[in-house]
Image (tube, helix red, strand yellow):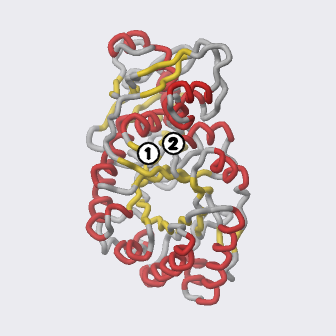
């Protein structure tokens, strides 16, 4: 597996010839447009199959898997363009096997809202070890705000992916409530009711893990929060269900600010089975143009976490999106629009601009002009994703948490399947 950055004048055919691979597979795996148009500076993942099967009339994914002695999941992972489905067309090429180039083993957890497209979800499920529907809220008295998660849970079962329940203080307005957390974490009876409600819901719906995300907690709640996580773990561990806690991206223990002070890394690391580092949103809707997850900052967060939490408990957050900022940026006025890597590439092609790569941030970006307005786009590509995956694998982290699955990022899954052991 290698990453190729498109130079001026290159085509899918010329790149395929350069590496001795099928141009059709190269285009389909990277989900290029039917025209084959490329953007200068675009990163393509090039895979080197050790065995390819050309589909014959009457072939099915099951019959092909049986013929070659591989699993259905292997075929789905090796052929991203199958969209996680089993329909085949005679004459198309399928990758049966790839060389073993594993850089390490990573568990892969992905977050999805209930309104995700079934097709988008199915395309990504073969690469996940766990799926986390977002999110169950809480009431002041310790009850649960329900979630329409039936489709997500059914899909997880079909693909053998472990479902994790998500619990947060997110309100219907889309904000994390500090006051709601304060009320719950200082009310033993409310906590007991909530823990019972969580257990009952997990049993009823078939969840096999819990992910807790209370944000914007004042420092005075750091120990009560850790105690709450420990109580959840004590209740769920007899079932063999892990408890994960999501934490703000702290770079040191005494980092000031409401986002950070209530998340005590050592205490939460001891209380939970796993800890998700939310290493993204440096570049965000209301901030100035910059990378969503600049590698130096991500590395600093991981370094601090490793100093107080065992590596095998850590999940590194990996973003699957970027932002498009209108220029000039005015604090308090400018709002960026989120977009997927595929949408960013489409913009670069549409406006004929070259994609740049910031070597410090390890992130791609470009500028374009539309309707008299300049724009700056920062997003994720194969290079930025591999930098983060390598960081997690080299640290010995348990895995990565993908925020989120709502839009597609083909190169991420090509990298995961071609360069790591998912497990």
Asked whether the beta carbons under mark 1 and mark 2 sit within 8 Å of each other, the answer is yes
Residue 386 pos. (x, y %):
35, 40
Element marked by disc 2: helix
* Quarter of the view holding residue 274: bottom left
Which residue is more in the foreground, 296 or 150?
A: 150
In-image side of 284 versus 116 (left or right): left
Residue 143 pos. (x, y %):
70, 77
Q: CA distance from mark 1 to mark 2?
A: 7 Å
Residue underneath mark 1: 422
Residue 249 pos. (x, y %):
38, 62
Name which residue lies at 47% across and 19% down. Answer: 52
Point out the image quarter for the N terminus. Answer: top left
Label 1, residues with CA under 10 Å away: few <14, some 14-19, many ≥20:
some
Residue underneath mark 2: 127
Name which residue lies at 40% across and 36% down. Answer: 415
Which residue is more in the foreground, 159 or 335?
A: 159
The answer to whether residue 222 of the structure is visible from this angle is yes
Name which residue lies at 38% across and 64% down. Answer: 313
């Amino acid at each position: 597996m290698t990453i190729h950055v498109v130079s001026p004048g290159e085509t899918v055919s010329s790149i395929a010839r350069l590496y001795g691979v099928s141009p059709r597979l190269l285009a389909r795996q990277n989900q290029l447009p039917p025209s084959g148009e490329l953007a200068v500076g675009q990163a393509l993942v090039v895979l080197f199959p050790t065995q390819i099967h050309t589909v014959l009339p009457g072939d099915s994914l099951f019959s092909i898997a049986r013929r070659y002695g591989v699993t259905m999941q292997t075929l789905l992972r090796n052929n991203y363009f199958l969209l996680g489905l089993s329909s085949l067309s005679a004459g198309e090429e399928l990758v049966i096997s790839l060389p073993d180039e594993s850089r390490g083993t990573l568990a892969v957890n992905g977050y999805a809202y209930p309104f995700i497209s079934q097709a988008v979800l199915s395309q990504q499920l073969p690469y996940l070890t766990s799926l986390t529907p977002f999110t169950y809220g809480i009431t002041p008295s310790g009850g649960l705000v329900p979630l329409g998660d039936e489709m997500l849970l059914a899909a997880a079962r079909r693909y053998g992916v472990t479902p994790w329940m998500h619990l947060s203080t997110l309100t219907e307005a889309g904000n994390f409530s500090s006051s709601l957390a304060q009320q719950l974490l200082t009310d033993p009876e409310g906590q007991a009711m909530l823990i019972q409600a969580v257990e009952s819901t997990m049993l009823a719906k078939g969840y096999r893990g819990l992910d807790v995300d209370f944000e914007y907690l004042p420092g005075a709640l750091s120990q009560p929060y850790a105690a709450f996580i420990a109580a959840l773990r004590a209740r769920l561990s007899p079932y063999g269900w892990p408890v994960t806690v999501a934490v703000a991206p702290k770079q040191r223990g005494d980092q000031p600010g409401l986002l950070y002070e209530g998340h005590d890394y050592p205490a939460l690391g001891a209380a939970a089975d796993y800890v998700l580092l939310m290493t993204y949103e440096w570049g965000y809707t209301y901030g100035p143009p910059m990378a969503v997850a600049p590698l130096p900052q991500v590395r600093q967060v991981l370094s601090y976490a490793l100093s107080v939490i065992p590596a095998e408990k850590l999940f590194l957050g990996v973003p699957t999106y970027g932002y498009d900022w209108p220029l000039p940026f005015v604090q308090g006025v400018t709002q960026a629009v989120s977009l997927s890597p595929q949408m960013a590439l489409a913009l670069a092609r549409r406006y004929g601009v070259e994609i740049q790569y910031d070597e410090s941030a390890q992130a791609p970006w470009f500028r374009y002009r539309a309707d008299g307005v300049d724009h700056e786009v920062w997003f994720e590509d194969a290079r930025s994703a591999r930098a983060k995956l390598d960081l997690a694998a080299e640290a010995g982290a348990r895995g990565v948490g993908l925020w989120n699955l709502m839009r597609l990022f083909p190169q991420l899954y090509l990298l995961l399947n071609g360069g790591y052991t998912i497990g």
